[in-house]
Image (tube, helix red, strand yellow):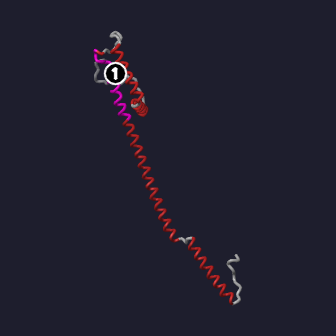
Amino acid sequence: MAADDFDVPRSSKRKLPNIAMSPETFGRGAEGFARFMGTPAFLVGMSVFCAVWLLWNTLLPESWQFDPRSLNFTLLTLILSLQASYAAPLILLAENRSSDRDRVEFEHDRQRSERNLADTEFLAREVAALRIAMREVATRDFIRSELKDLLKELEDERNDGSDDEQVGWNPRED
């Protein structure tokens, strides 16, 4: 193939290595980074790092300084800017993942609440049905009063029959 042949497209061979990382792995890493940046240990460590940097480049002889004060600590400024330029998107990614998790959790809570409401309404209907059914069922007190009335009737019949010398059944003998 000639170098001047522009009619034929070049084969798209990738020269950079293909880094295969799942979004979940990257997201977990971003959350870990954001979580670490929010700790007192990170803030104290960063403060100590900057203090040592400033003291080194201010108090030591100029031949030992690598980022002199006369240049307004340019290297430190660049390092902090680079750190901030990477930290901000990673923190936003972690926040987005957190809000996605919150959204999913909210949806699960809403579904659970709907199921609980449906269960509660079902149980309320069942209790109402039981109350209606209980009005039609003879209660223990009703049965006792009916048995007492029946027993009284039998005793009255027996007493009436004993006058005629009839031998009858005694319910108390059973």
- The residue that disc 1 covers is 79
Magenta stretch: helix, strand or loop mostly: helix
Image position of 71 (left or right of 127): left
* Dot 1 amino acid type: Ile
Q: Which residue lies at the image location 42% right of the left edge and 44% below the top edge?
A: 105
Q: Quadrant of residue 79?
A: top left
Q: Which residue lies at the image location 71% right of the left edge and 89% below the top edge?
A: 165
Using the image, determine if residue 103 lies above or below residue 126: above
Front residue of 44/160: it is 44
Using the image, determine if residue 80 lies above or below residue 172: above
Using the image, determine if residue 122 lies above or below residue 56: below
Q: Is residue 85 magenta?
A: yes
Q: Which residues are magenta?
A: 70-94
Question: What secondary structure is found at the residue carrying circle 1?
Answer: helix
Q: Position of residue 154 (x, y in %)?
A: 64, 82
Q: Quadrant of the N terminus?
A: top left
Front residue of 107/64: it is 64
Which residue of the protein is positioned furthest toward the front in this rendering? 59
Q: Position of residue 49 (x, y in %)?
A: 38, 21
Q: Is residue 92 magenta?
A: yes
Front residue of 131/5: it is 131
Q: Which residue lies at the image location 33% right of the left edge and 10% below the top edge?
A: 62
Image position of 131 (left or right of 7): right
Q: Give the tally of numbered discs.
A: 1
Which residue of the protein is positioned furthest toward the bottom in this rendering? 164
Image position of 9 (left or right of 149): left
Q: Give neighbour class at mark 1: few <14, some 14-19, many 20+ (Cα, 10 Å).
A: few
Q: Position of residue 153 (x, y in %)?
A: 62, 82
Q: Position of residue 168 (x, y in %)?
A: 69, 83
Which residue of the protein is positioned furthest toward the top in this rendering? 63
